[in-house]
Amino acid sequence: MKKLLLLIILTVSTAAPGQEYRISFDTLTEKMQQEPRHILIKIETAWCSICKMQDKQIESEEELKDLLSSKVYFITFDAETTETITFANNSYRFTPNAKGKGRHELATALGCTDNAYPMWVLLSEEYEIKGTFKGFLKSDTLKQILQKL
């Protein structure tokens, strides 16, 4: 009986998800009303291999995930999504180009004007751009940025 109880406790405790460190644009407004924070947006694309490497790095580091969930509202954003996104009381749409591809208006509004991904945008609680960073960020660099907030 004790072994069964121990097994149940271990299963429940390991299956319980940790605090999510990413949020969506859909939940940002409500979260900002409850607790204003800086916002960190990682602009990426589905085809970006460096973006995938960055995701694996973040996933493998608990300290980094803890900082992302406690210091900022962290959003990953696909610059080629065709969804309309409402952000800071404005609606942004996908803009196709002549080749059938394109870029989302929000990516451009945040300063992503070329195809260099990932691009990181740090915003204040008032949605003002405080910094932009291009390319792969090493864990120590990302931690330093977050710890300064």
Image (cartoon, rainbow, N blue to C red):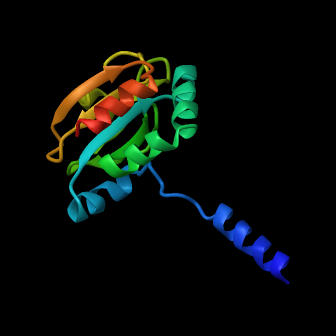
Q: Position of residue 76 (x, y in %)?
A: 43, 39
Left or right: 142, with 58 as reference point:
left
Residue 117 quadrant? top left
Q: Nearer the viewer, residue 81 or 117?
A: 117
Position of residue 14 relative to residue 25, above or below, is below
Residue 10 quadrant? bottom right
- Does residue 1 show up? yes
Position of residue 108 relative to residue 116, above or below, is below
Query: Residue, x 42% and y 23% (percent of image)?
Result: 137
Query: Residue, x 48% and y 24% (percent of image)?
Result: 101
Query: Residue, x 32% and y 39% (percent of image)?
Result: 40
Query: Residue, x 37% and y 33% (percent of image)?
Result: 143
Q: Position of residue 44 (x, y in %)?
A: 45, 29
Can you say which quadrant of the picture contains the N terminus? bottom right
Q: Nearer the viewer, residue 61 or 44?
A: 61
- Does residue 111 show up? no
Q: Position of residue 126 (x, y in %)?
A: 14, 46
Left or right: 73, with 136 as reference point:
left
Position of residue 89 relative to residue 140, above or below, is below
Q: Nearer the viewer, residue 131 or 91?
A: 131
Q: Residue furthest front?
A: 2
Q: Nearer the viewer, residue 50 or 149?
A: 149
